[in-house]
Amino acid sequence: MEYETISVSDERNVRTITLDRPDDLNAIDERVTAELQKELQGVARDRAVRCLVLTGAGRAFCAGQDLKSASAGDGPMDFTAALRRRYNPVVTALREMEIPTIASVNGVAAGAGWSLALACDLRIASTKAKFVVAFGSIGLVPDSGMTLTLPRLVGHAKALEIAWLGDPISAESALELGLVNRVAEPDQLAAATREWAERLAKGPTKGMGLTKRAINASLTNDLAAQLEYEAHMQGIAGRTKDYNEGVRAFIEKRPAEFTGE
Ligand code: LHQ
């Protein structure tokens, strides 16, 4: 697939999507959201893809909405419509995709760029990464899922502190706060990301996807509903080939070879 603003590569069942507008710090314009939507739909349908990595070209991960593009800044813009049409489908696709997703945060992540990283399941950051909420300083509300994802990771009061005061957060602080899972030196980021991505891509993909579904469902379920949902998910997981392989490998005292089925 030919894209203008993102690039895509595949290696060992890991698809990497690179936001590719480095001169504008990978800011998100109409084309970026359209291309991300298209690509994420393809990923969700492609059984060969068992882990997704999202990263940025050049020195930034993503500076959020392109403030210079025709759709922002000048003239009234219907933000509600823009979010519904452009950003929300991207966030929903990342959150609901039943494979692990990793944001490999190579540099600054600001505004909706940070939201995209938060919409991924795991985050690995370069020591050069910096997280900037950005919305507050231009009078906006954090969007693209950030008001859900951020407080879940750091707690209610810390999320409000971050949103209101807007101080940039370093990779080290992000690790302490639980905003990222792992930090790597800039020249080690790709290798650290690949290590986790390949491990995840060799896992029991269906069971991992069902686990993601169950943990997502816990955002709205009470205990009774969640127990029932787990029972339902386990019923499906127990019928996978990977479950049979996992048990056989345990009994035969050998590493399991999961196929994702
Ligand atoms: C940029 C951008 C940018 C264009 C840097 N656009 N060019 C969605 C839609 C609907 C409703 C509204 O909300 C949203 C979601 C959002 O994301 S709103 C938030 C939008 N993002 C921001 O407000 C962040 C703006 N950028 C910054 O604060 C800084 O640039 C950061 C902290 C990202 C990086 O700072 P520095 O490393 O010091 O770089 P810089 O500021 O010098 O930027 C380098 C270049 O990139 C520069 O261009 P130039 O031609 O002067 O070299 C910037 O203009 C350009 N750039 N962000 N969002």
Image: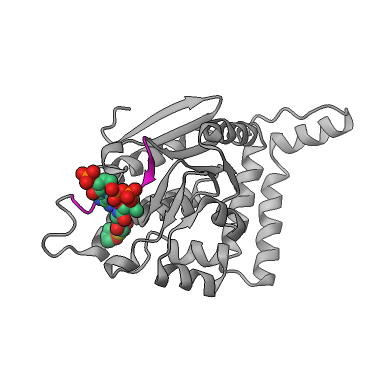
User: For residue 215, what is the image quadrant?
Assistant: bottom right
Image position, residue 60 (x, y; %): 38, 42
Image position, residue 176 (x, y; %): 61, 57
Question: Height in image: 186 above or below 139?
Answer: above
- Residue located at (33% from left, 27% from top): 1
For the C terminus, the image quarter is: top right
Which residue range is magenta in the image? 58-68
Picture colour scheme: one colour
Does 90 lie within the magenta span?
no
Does 67 lie within the magenta span?
yes
Q: Is residue 35 visible?
A: yes
Question: Height in image: 231 above or below 188?
Answer: below
Question: Height in image: 79 above or below 16?
Answer: below
Question: Closest to the observer: 102 or 209?
Answer: 102
- Residue located at (55% from left, 49% from top): 121
Image position, residue 141 (x, y; %): 34, 69
Question: Closest to the observer: 188 or 29?
Answer: 188
256 to the left or right of 13: right
Residue at the farthest top position: 11
Magenta region, main secondary structure = loop
134 to the left or right of 257: left
- Residue located at (56% from left, 65% from top): 154
Question: Height in image: 49 above or below 81?
Answer: above
